[in-house]
Structures are given as C-alpha cells and as structure tokens.
Image (tube, rainbow, N blue to C red):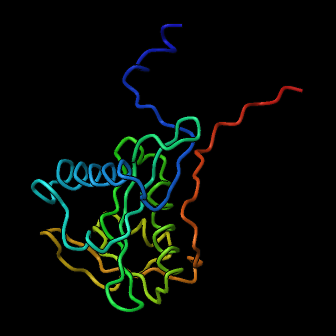
Amino acid sequence: MSALLEGVEHRPFIPTEYVVRLARTPWERAGYHALRREVFCTEQQVFAEDDRDGIDDVAIPIIAACCMAGMPDRIVGAVRIHEAEPGVWRGSRLAVHEDHRKLGRIGAELIRMAVSTAHGLGATRFLAQVQEQNVLFFRRLHWKSLGVISLHGLPHHDMQADLSRYPAHGQNQTWLLRPQPRTRQVA
C-alpha cells in the first residue's frame, strides 16, 4: 500500500476541468498578471520585475482557470489580444503554469479562444510574435511564419493564424475537460 502512495505528496493537483474565458473579475485579472510575472520574469527572465506594458491598457485578457466543483479556482493560463490597427489583431504574452503544461491542450485552447474572439470582433488578420521553441506548436495549430525576428534578445517568429481554422464567435468562455483513463469493462 505504501508503494502506491509513494511520492503522492510531491505531485501537483491536476484538475479534470478547466474554463477558458475573458478575464472579468478582479481576482482573475490579478491571477492573470501574477502568472505572466511568474512565467516571463521569474521562470524565463525575459523581464526584470514586471512584464506589463502599454498594450495592457487596451488588451483583452483571456485566462484559463482550473476548476474545483465546477467553479474557477486558480489561474493557470493567460494570453492577451488587442487590435493593433483596423482589422489587424495581435496576441501576446501566452503563458501556461508549469504544472499544467503537460496537459498540452491549455495553450492550444487559449490560442483558439484568442483568435476566434478577435475574429468575432472583426479581425481580418491575426498575428503574434512567437518564441522560437514554440513555432512548431503554432504550426500544428495552423499558423505560418512570416519571418524570424529578435525580441527582448531572444529569437522569435512573426506568425499569422489561418483565420479559416478559427471560426468567429462571441462566446465569453469555453470548457476544457482533461481526458480520463478508460476503465476496462469485464464481461
């Protein structure tokens, strides 16, 4: 029995349900900024103390929250979108908490929500500056590279989403369920 429980106290709790939505409450916005600081300042050290900039004044923040008993509990994903010029929208500051990256679908769902939301708000193009190590991930999600650039001293790609793969919608939120292992039925 003790072999079954060995190491359990060191494993993070991974919920089975997440909500991805436009950040709308003060605690969601606080969690959104805290996660960005954790990923871009502490973990990646791209920024010294805070990653906020002028875009935050006009951006729409989108969060992924893990749920407990169907209610959002903790912010584990973040991205922001803004209209850079009429019809041209940009996404930036995509972040997923380290303990939740292995699920693999949180980042993709944040991207889907970001692009589909912007598309619903009139985007004719959706662009992002993507860190080199994430380019293949974005390509799998129907993005193409427009060229390599250096940003904050790191290699990035200017990338564009294929809007035909991201239908416009006006949804405020979507749900993401983590697949559960199937139990075998004994006949």
Query: Is 134 displayed left or right of 149 in the figure?
Result: right
Residue plotted at (33% across, 90% down): 85
Q: Residue furthest left?
A: 48
Drawn side of residue 129 relative to residue 152, left or right: right
Residue extending furthest toward the bottom: 86
Q: Quadrant of the C terminus?
A: top right
Near-viewer residue (183 or 82): 82
Residue 149 position, x and y percent, is 21, 79
Q: Quadrant of the N terminus?
A: top right
- Report x, y in % for residue 141: 50, 70
Q: Residue at x 42, y 82 (%)?
A: 126
Counting labels gives 0
Q: Tell me the residue at 51%/61% (across/down).
A: 109
Camera-side residue: 150 or 32? 32
Locate residue 81: give its quadrant.
bottom left
* Res. 83 image quadrant: bottom left
On the rendered structure, is 54 left or right of 99? Answer: left
Which is nearer the eye, 132 or 23?
23
Q: Provide residue 117's location: percent of width, then percent of height.
A: 50, 73
Identify the residue at the far right of this view.
187
Q: Is residue 151 left or right of residue 60?
A: left
Instruction: Note whether 106 is above or below 85 in the view shown.
Output: above
